[in-house]
Image: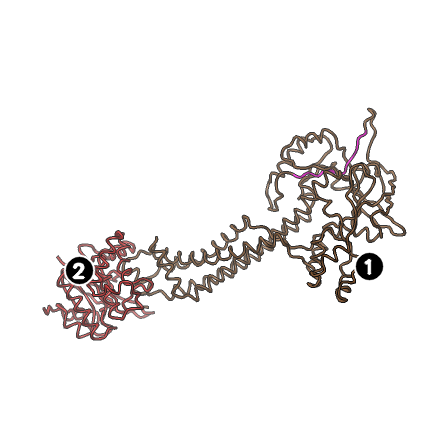
Chain colours: A red, B brown
C-alpha cells in the first residue's frame, strides 16, 4: 500500500489579480521505504508539491491520501496533529528553534507528542548518536555549523517516528562535505530503518543518490523513473 | 507548561536590550502609578483624618434646622436619652458635644470676628487630640534678637519663620526648607523659642486662642480678651477670659478664627440653658460629633457602615426634632473636592497605562513580525496554535511581571518612608494647600490594597496587548509563514 497517494492535484495562487497555476493535475504514489527526489528548475512547483503533501498548504483541487487518510478533509487543528504524528520535516534553512539546544530541539517534538521525559531523553540521545552529534547535544543552533544544524534537523524530523520525511532542498545551504555527510545519513536511515524520504532538489549530488526521480516542470510531472 | 515556559523565557532573552527596555517601561509605569496613587490616597486620608475624624466627626447629631441655619438658637439638648442611645451603641467610638457660635474678640484696641467653640476638654482631646496643637515654640522679634549664635544671613532669614509651632518637628521642617544650614542650630533655636501655655480643664474659666487670632489681637498667654456675641434667644453675651494657651492648628482658617473654652463656660456665655419647672437645668449644644469604629470611605455611591449607622440613629431619635448627618453631607465641598481630584488622578493614571500599553504593543508587533517564519516552522512540525499562543502570552506575562514586581519592590520603601516622613511643601503649592485650609504636608498612603489594584490594572492593560498575537497566530498560514 502506498504511503502517499496524490490524485489530480491542482494549486492556484493568486498573486494580486494574477492567478499562478503552480500545480497542474499531479498524480503520484510513493511507497514505504522509497528514497525519492522531486527535481525540476526553480518555480517548477517542487516546494508547492511538498507543502501540499505535508499538509502545510491546501490544494485548489485534488486529494492527498496519507496512510489511508485524506488530509485535504482535515481541519486545521487535526492537520497540525496529523503532521506531528505522521510527517517529519527538514527545511532548507534548517529552522531549528534557536533558543533550544540540539537535544532540546529533538526532544521538543516528542514533548508535543506527550512522551515521557525518560523516553524523550533516551531517543534524543540515540538520534544524536545516529547523526554523529552526541557530543554537541547541549549546543544551541548558533553554536553549530550549517551541516551540523541540518543533521540535527534530520534527527528532529525522525524523533516523532513519522511515516515519511519531507525535505525541501536540504543541501541548498551546505558545502560539499556537509552535503555528502547529510546524504549518507539519510541514505543510511532509509536503508537501515526503511524510512521513506521525499526531497526536492536541483543539486546533482543529491539526485545521484536518489532511488526514484520525479521531474516536474510547470507544475506537471514530466518524468518519473526508478533509478535504483 | 514547563517546556513552554522555558521557551518563552529564553525567547525573551534573545533580544536582551529590547526586553530590558520594554520591562523598564512597565516598571516605570507601575512605579509612577503606585507613587502617584500613594500620594493621592495619602492626601485624602490625611484630609479625612485631620478634618473628618479629628474635627467634624463621621456623623453629627443636630437640631433639624442647624445644618441650613447654624445659629445659636438652633441648638439641641444633650439629654440623658441621647447620651444613653449613643453609649449603648457599640459601633460608636467617641461622641462629643460642642457649642459653636460667632463672636467679636477684642484686646486693647484690636478686635476681630471669631468662632467660639465650647468643648468638653477631656473628651475633645481624646477625639481630636487638640492639645497636641498647643504652641510650645514661638519665633518673634524678641527671641530672634537673642539668637546671635546664628550667622547674619540666617538671622535675616529666620524672620520669615515668625509664628507659633506646636512641636519641634514643624519648626525644623520650615526652617530647613528655607535653608538647610538651620539644621546645625535647630536645638539652640528651639531652646531660645520655647513658649509656655497649658491646655484647658473642665471647670476652667480660661480659654485657648488660635495663633492667627492671637497674633492679630496681640495677646499672649496670661492676657485677657473680651468676647461679645449674640446669645441664646436674643440675649447679649459678653465676657472677659484669660488666655491659657495658644493653638497652632493645622488649618489656616481655624488659626485665624478659633477660640476654645470649656463647654459649661460657653453655655454660660451664650446662655444656652433653660431652668425647667422641675428645677433641672437643660443645657444645649450645637451638635454632637460622633466617630464610629469604621473608616470614612471616599468612594462614591457606597452605602457604608457609617451611613447604615446614620440611618439607624435617625430611626432611634425620631420625633425629637433631631437630624443625624453624615460627614459627606456636612462637608459637601470637601467630599466633592476629593471626588473630583480622585477622578482626575485616575484619568492621569489611565493615560499613563494606555501610553505604556502601546509601548508594549509595539514590542509585541516587532516580536511577531520577526518570528513569523519561526511560528510557521513550529506549526509545521506539529505545535498546536493553542500552545504557540501560550508561549507568546507567557512572554508578555513574564515581561509584564518583571516590570511590575521590580516596581513594587522599589515603590514599597519609598511610599512607606514618605508616609512617616511627609514632604513639607514650603513653596507655592504649599501656599495653595493652606488656602484650601490644609496643612502643607504631602504624606503617602502606606502600601495596602492599592499595591494590588494598580499592578493588577497594569497587568490587565498589558494582557490586552496579547489580543493581537492571538488573532495573528489564529490566522497565520503556515505556507506563507515558511516563505517569509
In the displayed structure image, the side of residue A130 where residue B167 appears, left or right:
right
**Residue at the image point whose x is 49% and y is 52% from the top:** B456
Residue extending farthest right: B109
Q: Quarter holding the N terminus of chain A?
A: bottom left
Is residue B9 visible in the rendered image? The answer is yes
Viewport quadrant of the C terminus of chain A: bottom left
Crowd tier of the residue under label 1, counting other residues whose Cα lies within 10 Å: few below 14, some 14–19, many 20 or above? few
Pointer 2 chain: A
Magenta residues span B281-291
Disc 2 and disc 1: Cα gap in Å? Answer: 106 Å
In which chain is the residue bearing label 1? B
Residue visible at 86% across and 46% down? B224
Q: Quadrant of residue B77?
A: top right
Residue occupied by mark 1: B141
> Residue B64 at x, y = what percent?
74, 36
Would residue B427 be visible to someone looking at this image? no
Question: For the residue labelled by badge 1, is the local secondary structure a helix, a strand or a loop?
Answer: helix
Task: Find out whether the residues at labels 2 and 1 contact each other: C-beta distance under 8 Å.
Answer: no
The image quarter in which residue B431 lies: bottom right
Q: Main secondary structure of the magenta part?
A: strand
Find disc 2 in the rendering and name its residue.
A4
Amino acid at each position: 500500500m502506498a504511503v502517499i497517494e496524490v490524485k489530480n492535484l491542482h494549486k492556484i495562487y493568486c498573486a494580486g489579480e494574477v492567478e499562478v497555476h503552480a500545480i497542474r493535475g499531479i498524480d503520484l504514489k510513493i511507497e514505504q521505504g522509497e528514497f525519492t527526489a522531486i527535481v525540476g528548475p526553480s518555480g517548477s512547483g517542487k516546494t508547492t508539491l511538498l507543502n501540499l503533501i505535508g499538509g502545510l498548504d491546501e490544494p485548489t483541487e485534488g486529494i492527498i491520501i496519507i496512510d489511508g487518510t485524506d488530509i485535504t478533509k482535515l481541519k486545521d487543528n487535526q492537520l497540525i496533529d496529523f503532521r506531528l504524528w505522521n510527517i517529519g520535516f527538514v527545511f532548507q534553512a534548517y529552522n531549528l528553534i534557536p533558543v533550544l539546544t540540539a537535544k532540546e530541539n529533538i526532544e521538543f517534538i516528542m514533548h508535543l507528542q506527550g512522551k515521557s521525559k525518560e523516553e524523550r531523553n533516551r531517543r534524543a540521545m540515540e538520534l544524536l548518536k545516529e547523526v554523529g552529534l552526541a557530543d554537541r547535544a547541549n549546543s544551541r543552533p548558533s553554536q553549530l555549523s550549517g551541516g551540523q544544524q541540518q543533521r540535527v534537523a534530520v534527527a528532529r524530523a525522525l524523533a516523532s517516528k513519522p511515516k515519511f520525511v519531507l525535505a525541501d532542498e536540504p543541501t541548498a545551504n551546505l558545502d560539499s562535505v556537509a552535503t555528502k555527510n547529510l546524504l549518507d545519513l539519510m541514505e543510511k536511515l532509509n536503508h537501515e530503518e526503511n524510512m521513506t524520504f521525499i526531497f526536492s532538489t536541483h543539486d546533482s549530488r543529491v539526485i545521484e543518490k536518489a532511488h526514484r526521480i520525479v521531474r516536474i516542470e510547470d507544475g506537471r510531472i514530466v518524468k518519473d523513473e526508478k533509478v535504483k | 507548561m514547563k517546556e513552554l515556559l522555558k521557551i518563552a523565557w529564553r525567547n525573551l532573552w534573545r533580544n536582551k536590550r529590547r526586553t530590558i527596555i520594554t520591562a523598564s517601561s512597565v516598571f516605570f509605569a507601575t512605579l509612577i502609578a503606585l507613587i502617584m496613587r500613594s500620594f493621592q490616597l495619602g492626601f485624602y486620608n490625611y484630609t479625612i483624618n485631620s478634618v473628618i475624624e479629628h474635627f467634624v466627626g463621621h456623623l453629627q447629631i443636630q437640631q433639624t434646622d442647624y445644618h441650613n441655619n447654624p445659629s445659636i438658637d438652633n441648638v439641641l439638648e444633650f439629654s440623658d436619652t441621647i447620651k444613653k442611645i449613643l453609649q449603648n451603641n457599640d459601633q460608636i467610638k467617641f461622641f462629643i458635644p460642642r457649642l459653636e457660635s460667632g463672636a467679636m474678640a477684642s484686646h486693647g484696641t484690636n478686635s476681630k470676628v471669631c468662632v467660639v467653640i465650647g468643648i468638653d476638654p477631656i473628651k475633645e482631646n481624646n477625639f481630636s487630640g487638640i492639645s497636641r496643637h498647643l504652641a510650645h515654640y514661638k519665633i518673634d522679634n524678641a527671641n530672634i534678637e537673642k539668637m546671635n549664635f546664628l550667622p547674619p544671613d540666617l538671622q535675616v532669614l529666620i524672620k520669615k519663620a515668625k509664628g507659633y509651632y506646636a512641636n519641634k518637628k514643624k519648626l525644623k521642617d520650615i526652617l530647613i526648607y528655607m535653608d538647610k544650614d538651620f539644621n546645625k542650630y535647630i536645638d539652640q533655636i528651639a531652646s531660645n523659642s520655647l513658649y509656655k501655655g497649658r491646655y484647658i480643664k473642665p471647670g476652667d474659666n480660661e480659654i485657648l486662642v488660635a495663633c492667627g487670632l492671637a497674633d492679630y489681637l496681640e495677646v499672649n498667654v496670661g492676657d485677657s480678651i473680651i468676647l461679645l456675641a449674640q446669645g441664646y434667644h436674643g440675649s447679649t453675651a459678653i465676657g472677659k477670659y484669660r488666655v491659657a494657651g495658644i493653638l497652632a492648628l493645622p488649618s489656616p482658617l481655624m488659626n485665624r478664627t478659633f477660640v476654645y473654652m470649656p463647654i459649661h463656660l460657653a453655655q454660660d456665655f451664650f446662655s444656652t440653658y433653660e431652668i425647667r419647672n422641675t428645677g433641672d437645668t437643660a443645657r444645649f449644644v450645637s451638635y454632637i460629633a460622633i466617630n464610629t469604629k469604621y473608616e470614612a470611605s471616599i468612594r462614591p455611591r457606597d452605602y457604608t457602615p457609617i451611613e447604615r449607622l446614620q440611618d439607624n440613629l435617625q430611626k432611634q431619635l425620631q420625633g425629637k426634632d433631631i437630624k443625624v448627618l453624615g460627614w459627606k453631607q456636612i462637608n459637601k465641598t470637601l467630599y466633592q473636592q476629593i471626588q473630583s481630584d480622585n477622578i482626575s488622578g485616575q484619568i492621569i493614571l489611565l493615560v499613563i497605562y494606555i501610553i505604556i500599553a502601546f509601548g508594549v504593543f509595539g514590542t509585541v508587533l516587532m516580536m511577531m513580525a520577526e518570528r513569523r517564519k519561526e511560528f510557521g516552522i513550529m506549526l509545521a512540525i506539529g505545535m498546536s496554535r493553542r500552545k504557540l499562543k501560550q508561549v507568546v502570552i507567557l512572554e508578555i506575562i513574564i515581561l509584564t511581571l518583571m516590570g511590575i514586581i521590580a516596581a513594587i519592590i522599589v515603590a514599597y520603601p519609598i511610599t512607606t518612608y514618605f508616609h512617616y516622613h511627609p514632604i513639607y511643601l514650603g513653596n507655592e503649592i504649599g501656599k495653595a494647600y493652606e488656602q484650601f485650609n490644609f496643612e502643607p504636608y504631602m504624606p503617602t498612603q502606606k502600601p495596602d490594597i492599592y499595591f494590588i489594584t494598580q499592578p493588577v490594572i497594569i497587568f490587565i492593560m498589558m494582557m490586552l496587548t496579547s489580543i493581537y498575537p492571538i488573532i495573528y497566530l489564529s490566522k497565520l498560514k503556515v505556507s506563507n509563514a515558511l516563505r517569509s
